[in-house]
Amino acid sequence: MKPAQQKKFDKKQFQANVKKHLTATYATTEENASTRQWYLAMGQALAEFTTLDLLQTETDKKITDAKSVNYLSLEFLIGRLTGNNLISMGLYENVTDAMAELGFNLTDLLEEERDPSLGNGGLGRLAACFMDSCAAQEFPTVGYGLHYEYGLFKQSFKEGAQQEAPDAWRGIEGYPWELVRPEIAQEIGFYGHVEVVMENGEEKRRWVPGMTVKAMPWDLPIVGYESNTVYPLRLWECQAIAPFSLESFNNGDYFEAQHSLIDAGNITKVLYPNDNHEKGKTLRLMQQYFHSAASIRDILRRHEAAGHALVDLPKYETVQLNDTHPTIAIPELMRILVDEKGFGWDKAWSISTKTFAYTNHTLLPEALETWSESLIQRLLPRHMEIIYRINHEFLMEVRAKWPGDVEKQRKLSIIQEGFHRMVRMANLCVVGSYAVNGVAALHSSLVKKDLFPEFDELYPTRLHNVTNGVTPRRWLKFCNPGLSALITEKIGDQWPAHLEQLSDISGFADDKAFQKQYMAVKKENKQRLATWVKENMDIELDTNAIFDVQIKRLHEYKRQHLNMLHILSLYHRLLNEPDFDMAPRVVFFAAKAAPGYHLAKEIIYAINKIAEKINNDARIGNKLKVVFMPDYRVSLAEIIIPASDVSEQISTAGKEASGTGNMKMALNGALTIGTMDGANVEIREEVGDENIYIFGLDVDGVNDIRARGYNPFDYYNSDHLLKASMDLLLGEEFTPGEPGKLRATFDSLLDGGDPYLCLADFASYVKAHEEMGEQYKDQSGWAKKAILNTALVGKFSSDRSIRDYVNNIWKLEPVHR
Ligand code: 26Q
């Protein structure tokens, strides 16, 4: 089926519209307009196609009478929308042609769009892929997030060290795809106290907030692939209710008068740049409550506007919590039902627990959110009372199940006892949801076995697995047009909506002509990346080399420093082993470190310094290059991923919940070198052991070695290559005149105890790389493996993930428009 937008497209009218926006919206003329203004005007003209659909879906009775999912997430890392929306609307060719007639290359125009980086990494990007898949398959969906003024910081390097700058993603002109919706704004309270009032002889509790702000919604259209469906991604912006206090203003205290404006403006000012790490900051909790409260109110508004009764909420709405960040939505719904809508506790609890479902994305203890009771008490006094009541009822269940077992109560309680009592958000989520899921098979089994074993005993049907996925529209069709065309030539054009069809490509894995075509496309993509690197970093690359890629947030558990040790080992051998023969390679990194994560920044610095030396060392010629690309973001991933030969997925087993970059690179024909962690386990199941390089300790091995008492010095002292590689960090090899400047990583790996077992996995990692490097010398054998990776990862389409949610958790039906 072709989307209606394509049928409606009239080239002349579209061109006229672009020109109209150039003057009417951006106040310039055809003669004077910059490329950026042409892009903006084109964006506005395109948004006209989706706005009406967006508004119509809102009131379409077929949709308001069907069950919807509400995806609540503090992060949506959507990336640029224009190119992707063109693909979904089926207008890519039409608009290429229309803009060419106006004298513009569409690719150049698309480059003018700034990435909306409204997320940190995997969790935010997953939310974006899920929105795309819900729209493509027409499962009624509303995404709820925050309209941050500044997205994830922009990264640059100054003499190798990370520098951060604010990301004003909307520019001064605003973002062409967003629509402000003042008619459905909400008011949100904070602070204040709880009053007791008598109502019909009954005691009722009511929250009287001490401060109120406005939640202003901005809608972004999520366009379903060839489906005529447009769902909103609704992002809340915090505004002051009155621009300033008139009283203080009239009293002449202008500065005082601005205060409310400053406070309210702060709540959605900037995205917190921490990934897999929580820091209990008041403003972060304010963001979370602001997001939850505005979203829950909007869900209830839609439900009531459709004429449905509140008792039927779970029949029409389900609320998916993307990690614990929106947990406060649970007590908020309870507060509204009990305090404002007059429900008894039990009825309200029954409605609420049939509405919420929760996805866990991490087992790392430092990432499990807890908030101090005293902070919640101060900011949200009524919610704290509700949490106590939920906990009280829950602990009665625990006592009934394990009579007399105080230890169980202590462990499961939503409130963690101690000097500073803390609220455990994950426990509140498990207790308050009808379904809880992990994000890959291994991760979900560890959620059951290690994180929530007692909850699993208490609620044996509550815990699920839904393996993550990625959208094949952005991560193959759009970012890799060469490979897409080749696939379409062989198996037709239905695969972007039915990715399992890619398995038909495996029939061509041995076909020498196809192998050549496949590798020629890879070469073109490598050339595109090499050109980017030359233009932006002035490093010359050989596209015959292996392009070995590690792109993800910088975190010790992801072990970029293990990759760095491997580079040091290659450098050492190139200089010291006359017979050492390796396939030339370029090792690419791209990663942002949380600004407060000291060691992560040291690792970036070390890799940059090592790169500088190696890239300019005439002794090793072009055998080895190291490229740390600055400012990793979705649009950069779209260039790197299609060009990757090798995908580094080397986290310590048990630490990476799933990973999704692993899926994107395998889909684009990279061979994974990885541990038995996260979704790597399932990728191996799909592509077969011969088409992936697995190394290192598995989860049991990790547990064993820790139980025996892990000592990194044992490895350092007994493995010559490891010692030689690490010792390179001690002198001034990479920091002339400044010996010891790279010590931080060295120290963390030895005196620091090597918490992520890099040294234990080093030898096995080196060996896997050697095998992989040998294989690369046989280009036909390599091509076969790469083709089989593309062919056999259809499972990892986010369309499949969404169908799993729909069938096993949400229980809803598609609505075709
Ligand atoms: C929490 C509290 C305060 C401030 C920030 C945070 C915070 C923010 C982001 C905590 C965690 C995150 C992000 C986590 C994340 O991206 N997890 C990844 O989720 C992916 C999608 O499921 C998985 O593939 C990755 O394995 C997992 O690391």
Image: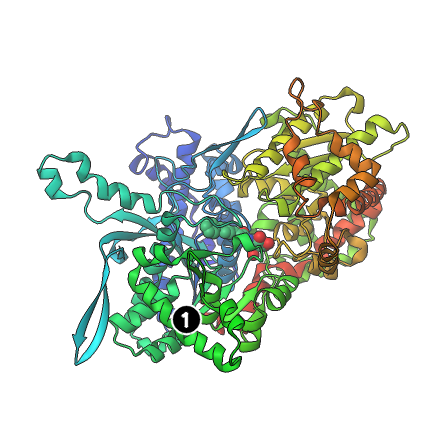
Viewer-closest of 16 and 459: 459
Viewer-closest of 777 and 511: 777
**Does any portion of residue 792 appear in the rendered image?**
no
Please indicate whether residue 277 sits to the left or right of residue 542 in the image: left
Viewer-closest of 249 and 30: 249
Q: Residue at x 53, y 50 (%)?
A: 276
| Horizontal and vertical percent position of residue 182 | 26, 53
| Horizontal and vertical percent position of residue 407 | 53, 71
| Horizontal and vertical percent position of residue 470 | 58, 55
Give the total number of marks visible in the rendering: 1
As drawn, 365 above or below 35: below
Residue 590 falls in which quadrant of the image? Answer: top right
Residue 372 falls in which quadrant of the image? Answer: bottom left
**For the C terminus, which image quadrant?**
bottom left
Q: Residue furthest right?
A: 579
| Horizontal and vertical percent position of residue 784 | 80, 50
As drawn, 342 above or below 297: below
The residue where tag 1 is placed is: 391
Q: What's the residue type where badge 1 is placed?
A: Asn
**Does any portion of residue 24 appear in the rendered image?**
yes
Q: Residues within 10 Å of mark 1 (few under 14, many from 20)?
A: some
Q: Residue at x 63, y 59 (%)?
A: 796
As drawn, 625 above or below 738: below
Please indicate whether residue 370 sits to the left or right of residue 674 in the image: left
